[in-house]
């Protein structure tokens, strides 16, 4: 999830700055969240069919891109394809009332699904962020306790963000009966996601600094220092 190590950078894939930037984007966790973000932005009355179709296309694109680049299949990517394929198929069989119900609750359904993915990945000891982080570091760090623990914590933060978004959406739809409420529909949910993104960027650096400081403290007091008088 981050380009340090705790997450020490792996050799850059491809050639040139352009390839490096594209590689970092494709290796990042936002590729797995991209179809959900698309759904959150464009879902609305009468949009379930085309939105789910585009979200499915986005999901398939990133899964295929990973395979072409020799990356492992990721849990989130697989669930993306299954969820949006299922949503696309189901909407054809719904009655008009069923369509209205789905359009009202699709935001909460998607956020709860993401909570289940995040919490479930922790329970099976494969936090979903770990798979993305491993694409960005040298394999020698993949099983480092610090590296793994960092991704457990980051995945937990994402689970909390998804839960906040689901709760906010539910309150807007069920209690306020207003799925366009600016606070419950946008501010709280977007804020939760932005906090998770920021934490994902900040926390590995914080852990890296802490580990480095502890390493320096473990060295002999004057190790690596030149004599006070300089070289003879």
Image: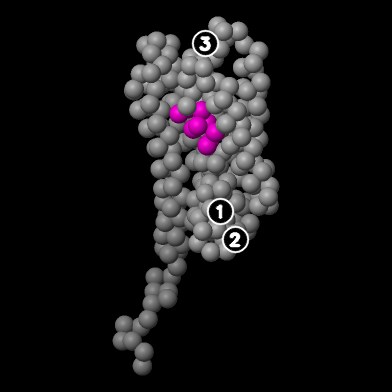
Report crowding for label 3: few under 14, some 14 to 19, many 20 or more residues within 10 A (C-alpha).
some
In the rendered view, does 164 fall on the left or right side of 66? left
**What is the magenta segment's predominant secondary structure?**
helix
Q: Magenta segment range?
A: 33-41
Q: Residue furthest bottom?
A: 232
Residue labelled with disc 2 = 14
Residue 58, x across and y down, in percent: 58, 37
* SS assignment at label 2: loop
Say whether disc 1 or disc 3 marks the residue closer to the N-terminus: 1
Residue 15, x across and y down, in percent: 57, 63
Q: What residue is at 43 percent from the left and 26 percent from the top?
A: 164
Residue 112, x across and y down, in percent: 53, 23
Asked whether the viewer can see residue 227, the reply is yes
Structural distance between the alpha carbons of marks 2 and 1: 8 Å
- Magenta residue check for 167: no
Structural distance between the alpha carbons of marks 1 and 3: 40 Å
Labelled pair 2, 1 in contact (Cβ < 8 Å): yes
* SS assignment at label 3: helix
Residue 84, x across and y down, in percent: 61, 27
Type of colouring: one colour
Residue labelled with disc 3 = 100
User: Can you say which quadrant of the picture contains the C terminus?
Assistant: bottom left
Say whether disc 2 or disc 3 marks the residue closer to the N-terminus: 2
Say whether disc 2 or disc 1 marks the residue closer to the N-terminus: 2
Q: What residue is at 63 percent from the left and 23 percent from the top?
A: 88
Q: Residue furthest left?
A: 229
Which dot marks residue 23?
1
């Amino acid at each position: 999830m981050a380009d340090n190590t705790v997450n020490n950078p792996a050799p850059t894939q491809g050639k040139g700055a352009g390839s490096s930037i594209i590689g970092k984007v494709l290796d990042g966790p936002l590729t797995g969240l991209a179809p959900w973000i698309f759904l959150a932005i464009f879902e609305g009355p009468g949009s379930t069919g085309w939105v789910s179709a585009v979200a499915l296309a986005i999901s398939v694109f990133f899964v295929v891109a990973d395979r072409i680049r020799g990356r492992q299949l990721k849990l989130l990517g697989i669930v993306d394809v299954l969820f949006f394929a299922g949503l696309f198929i189901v909407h054809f069989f719904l009655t008009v009332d069923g369509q209205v119900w789905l359009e009202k609750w699709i935001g909460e359904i998607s956020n709860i699904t993401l909570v289940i993915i995040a919490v479930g990945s922790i329970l099976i000891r494969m936090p979903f962020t770990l798979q993305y982080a491993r694409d960005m570091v040298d394999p020698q760090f993949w099983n480092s306790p610090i590296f793994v623990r960092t991704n457990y914590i980051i995945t937990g933060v994402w689970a909390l963000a998804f839960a906040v978004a689901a709760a906010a959406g539910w309150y807007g739809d069920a209690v306020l009966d207003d799925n366009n409420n600016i606070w419950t529909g946008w501010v709280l949910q977007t804020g939760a996601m932005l906090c998770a993104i920021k934490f994902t960027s900040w926390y590995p650096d914080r852990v890296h600094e802490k580990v480095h400081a502890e390493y320096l403290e473990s060295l002999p007091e004057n190790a690596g220092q030149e004599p006070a008088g300089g070289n003879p």
